[in-house]
Image: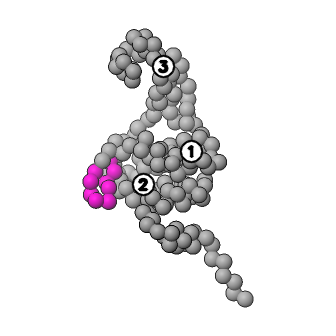
């Protein structure tokens, strides 16, 4: 593993332990050339996924990009980091098990929204506001009306 500080390719693993509910290995590394310490995560990757954007453009699936968007949605919410990591790993496993390496971005968005709805409604609405490109307060109001159960009485 190349040192991110000096570029040395001969780094040493000082500590390894399971991470993210045993779906990754966390490794603490040391660079003997510059003395730098850093952490890497090793995960099983079943397939190289390609995201098909709404404009038809194709790009390599980026787990870090998925993680960033979910972390933004869950920012300042009472969700433990381990729960968030489990959710992200579950989403990636689900995407890998779809049977196709080309995945429409809409499919990814729907899976993320479904996962967020199960753990935090506020994060779900935050993510949906970006994913569905809300332009005005009316968009939020319609979304929230659709989200709430029907409260009409038949009396």
Residue at image location 45% in from the left, 17% down from the top: 36
Which residue in the structure is indicated by mark 1? 84
Q: Earlier in the sequence, mark 2 or mark 1?
A: 1
Q: Does the magenta segment cover residue 143?
A: no
Q: Nearer the viewer, residue 39 or 6?
A: 6
C-alpha distance separating marks 3 and 1: 25 Å
Question: Can you say which quadrant of the picture contains the C terminus?
Answer: bottom right
Residue nearest the viewer, comparing 57 with 138: 138
Vertical placement of 16 versus 35: above or below? below
State the extent of the magenta-drawn residues as a range: 50-58
Sequence-first disc among 3 and 2: 3
Q: Residue at x 60, y 47 (%)?
A: 76
Q: Are marks 3 and 1 in contact (CB under 8 Å)?
A: no
> Which mark, residue 108?
2
Q: Looking at the image, is 38 positioned above or below residue 124?
A: above
Furthest residue in direction bottom, as rendered: 155
Give the secondary structure at mark 1: helix
Q: Which residue is mark 3?
A: 37
The quarter of the displayed image where residue 35 is located = top left
Q: Which residue is at 63% across, 77% downward?
A: 150
């Amino acid at each position: 593993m190349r040192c991110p500080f000096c570029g040395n390719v001969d780094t040493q693993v000082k500590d390894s332990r399971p991470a993210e509910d045993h779906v990754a290995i966390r490794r603490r590394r040391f660079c003997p050339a510059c003395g730098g310490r850093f952490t890497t995560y090793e995960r099983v990757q079943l397939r190289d996924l390609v995201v098909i954007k709404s404009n038809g453009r194709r790009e390599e699936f980026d787990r870090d990009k998925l993680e960033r968007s979910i972390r933004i949605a869950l920012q300042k919410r009472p969700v433990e980091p381990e729960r968030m990591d489990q959710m992200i790993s579950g989403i990636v496993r689900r995407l890998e098990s779809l049977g196709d390496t080309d995945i429409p971005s809409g499919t990814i968005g729907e899976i993320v929204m479904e996962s967020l709805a199960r753990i935090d409604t506020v994060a779900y609405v935050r993510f949906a506001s970006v994913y569905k490109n809300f332009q005005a307060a009316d968009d939020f109001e319609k979304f929230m009306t659709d989200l709430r159960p029907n409260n009409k009485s038949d009396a």
